[in-house]
Amino acid sequence: MFKKVCIIGCGLIGSSIARAIKKNNLSVKIVSSNRSDTTNKKVIKLNIVNESSSDTKKMVKESDLIIIATPLSSYKSLIFKIKNSLKNGAILTDVGSVKEKVISLIEKNIPKNVSWISSHPIAGTEESGPEAGFSELFKDRWCIITPSSQAKKRDIKLLKNFWKKIGSRVDIMDAKQHDYILSITSHIPHLIAYNIVNTTLDINEKKKQEIVKYSAGGLRDFTRIAASNPIMWRDIFIQNRENASIMIDKFIENLRDLKKAIKNKNEKKLEKIFTKTKKIRKEIVKAGQDIGKANFGRK
Amino acid sequence: MFKKVCIIGCGLIGSSIARAIKKNNLSVKIVSSNRSDTTNKKVIKLNIVNESSSDTKKMVKESDLIIIATPLSSYKSLIFKIKNSLKNGAILTDVGSVKEKVISLIEKNIPKNVSWISSHPIAGTEESGPEAGFSELFKDRWCIITPSSQAKKRDIKLLKNFWKKIGSRVDIMDAKQHDYILSITSHIPHLIAYNIVNTTLDINEKKKQEIVKYSAGGLRDFTRIAASNPIMWRDIFIQNRENASIMIDKFIENLRDLKKAIKNKNEKKLEKIFTKTKKIRKEIVKAGQDIGKANFGRK
């Protein structure tokens, strides 16, 4: 499919893509660029890529596909660094969770003959770093593609096929719609998880041992999400702050409403809400977006 | 261990206890009482109990151990119904998630020679009903015991052993402390999960299909918790409303603070909070309260 693929940032997502490329024979050569030399050495030792260096320009050169898999806050300096090293006719993509602001930033700054097509594979775990990656991470997960205006049709098709070959289902969506939908399905759930774990620890540093002990009552599920990469999520919330802000306000309004119903012992109202939320689970399992086993199959 | 055990309410928890009693040979006879005759027939057909009837008084008679496993709102009428049928010297327990109000209610209304010792096994899944139960549900989970003032020491010891024999680790805690700790580790996480799923659906009934499709970005974890038994949780929030109320206020205060940090692009503050919350996960896994596999081991 490609002669050379360059992955910038070999963390959980980047290293999973590299592994999937290797497993499916999608490129003759895979290289990566990481700021830390420890990581560059590690990804070669783990046999994830053929070559890796902090010299991003050098790694990018002659690559047919370049995948940015670093936190959103790094995009600006990164694009200025690599723009003159991009191969004529290359495809540039990323795996970022917010689109609107970064798409125009990159579009303004790259050569005309490079197809900039943003990607967002909706996949991940609470773990970080190249050791945490695995080739099956994208299997049966959705990948949303948001092409920039100057991207060639042929390249969009090629990138779609690339994601399909590593197991994803692909949708095309514009940036505005993407950022709105993902704020609901991903960003706000993460923010809420961080907030509940933070609130819990905040008022109860002394009681932490008891909280850990009895966390199986519900809290433990939130701690999984709140264990995700802090830098990545910091950048996501800041980049999607307008949508996040609106959703936070709606969330607080509804929570106040629930508080009132609890205070007034409004059994009917509570029952109605809790019955409504129950149904959505079945649809998610039916859509193949979660496993149907009770407790996620935990023993 | 016992000659006759009576389980009032053979749902997820009640039927799991019945199965565990049978598996571990802890009683000669196991009976249950359910309001619905469909359920009474089902639990006999499924071989979960020896006898089952909507005639609660009859089922309770001659029982050495009576376990209330119905929603908290049913306790009041239930205790008036059974109090004169309780065997002299019997142990009465429950599996409820809130203690303070129900303990005094029952204490005031039962014969002196019955040991009323409240229990709370911190175990469960998002599923409901007798088919959903399994004998291993309590394995390695904590069970908190809150004896009433008139409970005999010998009976407290016996009930502790009972929970241990079906796999639990047992702690003794007073009602006030129990309700406070559990509001943090269980009640508020459930309320927040219900609220986020409700907020999501509320504003986006039209976009529901897309929300289901991309739910793997985080939302799906919340939908699991928000699929729990609506009646049970309605009662829990109402019974523990004072603690819930305080925690909701703290949660909203912190969420407002996060919103402000996002709006002001306060990278340092966000990073600090998200790093702090990351640590607790490891401690929960270390304490054996969750599995350590990424994504709960979901594929």
Image (cartoon, coloured by chain):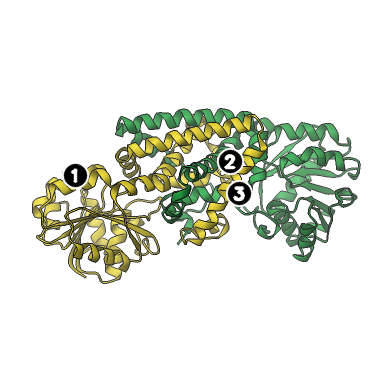
Chain colours: A green, B yellow
Q: Is label 3 in a helix, a strand or a loop?
A: loop
Q: Is label 1 in a helix, a strand or a loop?
A: helix
Q: Which mark is residue A186?
A: 2
Amino acid type for the residue under numbered disc 2: Ser
The Cα atoms of the two marked residues, 3 and 2, are separated by 12 Å
In screen coordinates, is B298 left or right of B116? right
Query: Looking at the image, can residue A178 be seen?
Result: no
- Which mark is first along the chain, 2 or 3? 2
Q: Residue at x 74, y 60 (%)?
A: A24
Same chain assignment for discs 3 and 1? no
Residue B5 percent coordinates (x, y): 19, 63
Amino acid type for the residue under numbered disc 3: Ser
Same chain assignment for discs 2 and 1? no
- Furthest residue in direction front, as rendered: A206
Task: Say few, some or many: other residues with alpha carbon within 10 Å of mark 1 (under 14 / 14 to 19 / 20 or more).
Answer: few
Mark 1 highlights which residue? B105
In screen coordinates, is A175 left or right of A91? left
Residue A192 percent coordinates (x, y): 52, 39
Q: How many labels, in total?
A: 3
Amino acid type for the residue under numbered disc 1: Leu
Task: Say few, some or many: other residues with alpha carbon within 10 Å of mark 2 (under 14 / 14 to 19 / 20 or more).
Answer: many
Mark 3 highlights which residue? A228
Whether tag 3 and tag 1 are in contact, CB under 8 A, the answer is no
The chain letter for the residue carrying disc 1 is B
The relative height of residue B103 versus residue A242 in the rendered view (above or below) is below
Q: Residue at x 85, y 34 (%)?
A: A109
The quarter holding residue B113 reads: bottom left
The relative height of residue A50 versus residue A193 in the rendered view (above or below) is below
Query: Looking at the image, can residue A150 be seen?
Result: yes
Whether tag 2 and tag 1 are in contact, CB under 8 A, the answer is no
